[in-house]
Structures are given as C-alpha cells and as structure tokens.
Amino acid sequence: MRKWPISQKFDRPRRRRIAAAGFTLVEIIVVVIVIGVLATLIVPNLFSRVGKAKHSVAQQKLAALEQAIQIFSYDYGRYPQSLDELVNRPADIDPEKWTEPTVKDKDLIDPWGNPWGYRYPGDQSVYDLFSFGADGQPGGDGENADVTNW
C-alpha cells in the first residue's frame, strides 16, 4: 500500500490550532494583575481576623486561669504568690495535700507568646491577672488591647 505525502495545504489549519492553544503574554499579565488586586483586598481582612481570634483565645485562657486560682485558694486557704504555684507545688504545701494541677506550663503563656501577668495582692481586685496584648505594652486597641480580669 502506498502512502501519500501530506501536502502543506492540509497541514496549515493544524499548525494554527497548535499555535492558538497557548496563552499570550498579555493574558498572563492581566491574570497576575487581577490576582494581585484580589490579594490586596483580602489579605488585610484575613490578618485582622487572626488578631481577633487571638484576643478571644486570650479571654478564654484568662477565664481558665481565674478558675485555677480560685480552686487553688479553696484547696490551700490562700492565693498563689505566682502563677508558677498553679503548676508546681509550693514549699509550704504538704505533698499529701497537693492535688494534680488543673493548668500546665503552656497555659501560663498568652496567645502572643508572653507570660501572663499576675499580681497578688492586686491593685484592681484581690489579684490582678493580665496580658498586654500583641505589643506587650499597657493599653492599646485592637490586637494590642489588654486582656484583664478587672
């Protein structure tokens, strides 16, 4: 059986279809610009929500620490001198009376990686429990706002 050579006339439409299948440089640039505009609109909202979430977590951790402090005071008839006493047995408490702590070392760190502040006796109440927020400085708004028990 004899094979006939494909003429150039029949091969041209096929070449055009192959060349038209790719993206042009202009199309790629337009897509990159659209993605950039969308990113500038969405990313700031995403980061503000992360800050709000950390603030909510800080309020929940503060409530858990307050509860642990109250349990400590009921069990031992005094408030802890430091938050470390919620995790490690103080020297003045008999080992037989010591109960397993309700908090762990990691609970003594706020969501921004700073240790919780604790003052006994407190200036605002019997004891002061606080976090200075993301900036670690007193005062502030938004993510930098203080979380306190008063």
Image (spheres, helix red, strand yellow):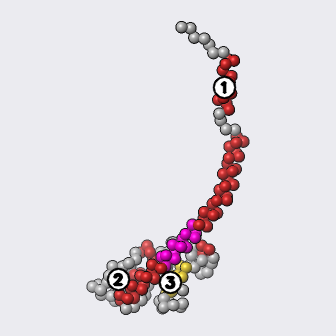
Earlier-in-chain disc, 1 versus 2: 1
Decide if residue 16 is on the left or right side of residue 97.
right
Q: Secondary structure at mark 1?
A: helix
Pick out the residue farthest to the left. Answer: 96
- Disc 1 to disc 2: CB gap under 8 Å: no
Which label was assigned to residue 15?
Answer: 1
Q: Main secondary structure of the magenta part?
A: helix
Please determine whether, in this image, residue 36 is positioned above or below residue 125: above
Dot 3 alpha-carbon crowd within 10 angstroms: few under 14, some 14 to 19, many 20 or more: many
Earlier-in-chain disc, 2 versus 3: 2
Earlier-in-chain disc, 3 versus 1: 1
Which label was assigned to residue 129?
Answer: 3
Q: Residue at x 67, y 55 (%)?
A: 38
Decide if residue 58 is on the left or right side of residue 29.
left
Q: CA distance from mark 1 to mark 2?
A: 82 Å
Q: Mark 2 against mark 3, which lies toward the viewer?
A: 3
Amino acid type for the residue under numbered disc 3: Leu
Q: Mark 3 against mark 1, which lies toward the viewer?
A: 1
Location of mark 2 (residue): 89
Dot 1 alpha-carbon crowd within 10 angstroms: few under 14, some 14 to 19, many 20 or more: few
Residue 84 x %, y %: 41, 81
Range covered by the magenta-colored residues: 50-62
Q: Is residue 115 visible?
A: no
Viewer-proximal residue among 74 and 111? 74
Q: CA distance from mark 3 to mark 1?
A: 75 Å
Viewer-proximal residue among 62 and 137? 62
Q: Is residue 98 visible?
A: yes
Q: Secondary structure at mark 2?
A: loop
Viewer-proximal residue among 49 and 96? 49
